[in-house]
Amino acid sequence: MSLILMTLESGRISEEQIDQMGEAAPEMKVVITQDRQEIESLLEEIEIVVGDLPRDLLPRAKKLRWMQLWGAGADWLMRYPEAQEMDFVLTNASGVHAIPITEHIFAFLFSLGRGFHKAMRAQVEGKWRKPEGDELFELPDKTMVLLGVGAIGQQTARIADALNMRVIGVRRDPSVSAPGVERMVGNDQLLVVLPEADFVVVTVPLTHETERMIGERELRAMKPGAYIVNIGRGKIIDQDALIRALREGWIAGAGLDVTDPEPLPADSPLWAMENVIITAHYSGLTPYYDERALEIFLDNLKRYRAGEEMRNVVDKGLGY
């Protein structure tokens, strides 16, 4: 009997949801475990993995035909290029994060715009601090340069457009338009559009192409009054260059949900900067995460069994 291995923590999936999996593929056995020894004993039977599999076990999973990641990121492919040659389809949970991460992005922008980052520090210190009017800003009529226009970027663009912001999208294939994006350019035009940005929002996945996509040259191209928000991966921005940019006033501030490394060391100068808001890589968290990810998997399971094209197929060469 072929086997579906789900490598999620115990209790994340309810009995009712497990039954849904069984009903969708009654001829397959479902095993939920993170125990390496148990996984090794099942390698010859595993046809589908939901979640992840230790990299060193992948070559031994000869029957594996499909792996459904429980998250969107597949940057582990950068460290394991051998997966490109392996005979399995890789899909991810792209789209599951669109609502919470978009809200996180705008939480950064609203907080910076209304000075909440400084107000919270003043609250901890027990100080009554009122900002000057020119310390604050409003979002309408501002320009957002959006790096990455996938599911998260598209949701962000729609909300920005509703707030009467102007959105310039930067994506690998600029011929693909998106609602809310006024102008779409390729990655090679990044330096051209950065000077127009009031906000640079980074949503691209980490790949060989996007690693250090934002460095000193790009930060110096931004306006002194511009802000950068990163919810992608820490390595997309050269963090040493970012620290210099914030210290020396090349840009006005930053909202960072991801850093390099993670956790961010306690002695990082970013912690003490008044123009920086840091969150601990949780922009994608939501009470509805597993429910949405399971819906993607169940839909893909039906497509897989019917021999149809699946959702969110990852190009293992590109890494997304």
Image (cartoon, rainbow, N blue to C red):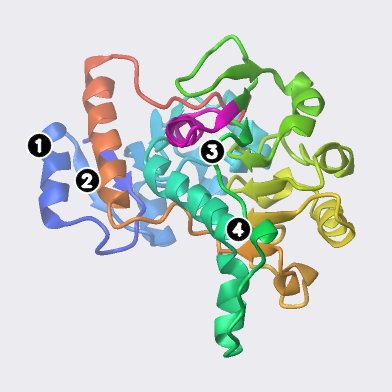
Percent across and percent down for residue 250 are 86, 50
Residue 154 lies in the magenta-colored region = yes
Q: On the image, numbered disc 2 is attached to which residue?
A: 30
Mark whose residue sits in front, 2 or 1: 1
Q: CA distance from mark 2 to mark 4?
A: 47 Å
Q: Dot 3 lies on which element?
A: loop
Question: Amino acid under label 4?
Answer: Leu
Percent across and percent down for residue 272 are 74, 74
Task: Looking at the image, tell me whether mark 3 or mark 2 is earlier in sequence order.
Answer: 2
41 to the left or right of 31: right
Task: Looking at the image, tell me whether mark 4 or mark 1 is earlier in sequence order.
Answer: 1
Q: Dot 2 lies on which element?
A: strand
Question: Amino acid under label 3?
Answer: Pro
Q: On the image, numbered disc 4 is attached to which residue?
A: 112
Task: Looking at the image, tell me whether mark 2 or mark 4 is earlier in sequence order.
Answer: 2
Task: Looking at the image, tell me whether mark 3 or mark 1 is earlier in sequence order.
Answer: 1
Crowding near pointer 2: few (<14 within 10 Å), some, many (20+)? many
Residue lying at the far top in this picture: please name it: 175
Q: From which residue to which does the magenta span run?
A: 149-167
Q: CA distance from mark 4 to mark 1?
A: 48 Å
Mark whose residue sits in front, 4 or 3: 3
Q: Is residue 90 above or below residue 178?
A: below
Is the residue under label 1 in contact with that under label 2 (CB below 8 Å)? no
Q: On the image, numbered disc 3 is attached to which residue?
A: 140
Mark whose residue sits in front, 3 or 2: 3
Q: Quadrant of the C terminus?
A: top right
Question: Amino acid under label 1?
Answer: Glu
